[in-house]
Image (cartoon, helix red, strand yellow):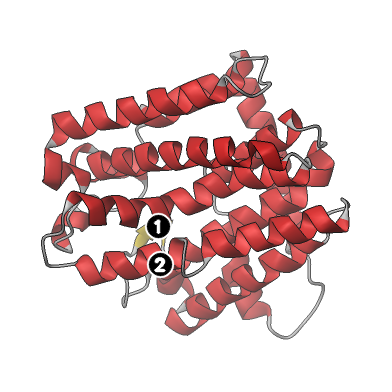
Amino acid sequence: MTDFQEKMDGYRQRVEEALERALQFGNCPQQAVIDAMRYSLLGGGKRIRAILLLEFAGACGVSEEAAMPFAAALEMIHAYSLIHDDLPCMDDDDLRRGKPSCHVRFGEANALLAGDALLTHAFAVAASAKLPADRVLAAVSELAGAAGVLGMIGGQTLDLESEGREIDEARLIDIHRMKTGALISAGPVIGCILGGQPGRIDEAREYGLRLGLAFQIVDDILDVTGDQQILGKPIGSDRDNVKTTTVSLYGLERAGRLADDLTGQALSILKGFDFSDGFMEELTRILAKRQK
């Protein structure tokens, strides 16, 4: 096992443990929604958003234990977004991470409530962080903004409005910047906020946005070229929903070059931070070459 893989596996294990702890509600009658929350949140995943937050927080002098509530909260918000993405009124996908989507397994009503519950509970978990109150408050505000109407929700809205019609490059970048980039960049930014280093926030945000755009472009490519067994979700959904993507706009080859260019820009920004072990550089490169 490589040092990189060992560190990734360690991060994932500790994030999973934190998520498991966060969903301990004791015995209560509303178990159906808790089961749906657990099914989607603990059902696997790369945990990239949490790892980015923990890495940037560490580079800014914050311990993993102190930053973990925000890392867990970020994963909860991501999980909620996937539950709602899969609903029949949205992308209408029946498969997620190789398993039936939450609404297929638990019904639409419970899936809707599970997503709402994860979003709400995320802020309670984030607010439990044992750090100076002003930093926690600023980080909670950043998290809300990334998830809200000027972030992920805004991107989702534009994405839905764009189905079935052609859109230009500027509109597509806006969608990706908000829908995918906002939550990915939230990790690096919140890491700097928790570390009391507001002067690093702009760099962290630019890194995250470039990484997020590259990440989404790779998603667009995999929706055309990927293997459903490896991806754990249907391919071709963008085509079926008549969505403009970087692939439909530029073609596969140019889209791949754009992802590489954005990755290179993200790597350049990383040089301004104290990441001495090479982990972040390798993670950034791997995300641009992933197969799922």
The answer to whether residue 85 is above or below residue 30 is above
Residue 264 position, x and y percent, is 39, 22
Looking at the image, residue 23 sits to the left or right of residue 187; the answer is: right
Residue 19 position, x and y percent, is 70, 54
Q: Which residue is mark 2?
A: 154
Q: Amino acid at mark 2?
A: Gly
Which of the pair 74/226 is nearer the observer? 74
The answer to whether residue 192 is above or below residue 257 is below
Determine whether the residue tagged by mark 1 lies in a helix, strand or loop.
helix
**Residue, x 50% and y 35% (percent of image)?**
207
Q: Which residue is mark 1?
A: 179
**In the image, farthest residue toward the front:** 199
Tell me the quarter of the picture where residue 238 sits: bottom left
The answer to whether residue 3 is above or below residue 56 is above
**Residue, x 18% and y 59% (percent of image)?**
243
Q: Mark 1–mark 2 contact, CB under 8 Å?
A: yes
Residue 221 position, x and y percent, is 24, 39
Cα gap from disc 1 to disc 2, whole angstroms: 7 Å
Tell me the quarter of the picture where residue 203 sits: top right
Residue 181 position, x and y percent, is 44, 48
**Residue, x 68% and y 48% (percent of image)?**
71
Q: Residues within 10 Å of mark 1 (few under 14, many from 20)?
A: many
Looking at the image, residue 139 sits to the left or right of residue 214; the answer is: right
Determine whether the residue tagged by mark 2 lies in a helix, strand or loop.
helix
Question: Is any part of residue 67 visible from this angle?
Answer: yes
Looking at the image, residue 242 sits to the left or right of residue 1; the answer is: left
What is the quadrant of the C terminus in the image? top left
Looking at the image, residue 280 sits to the left or right of residue 20; the answer is: left
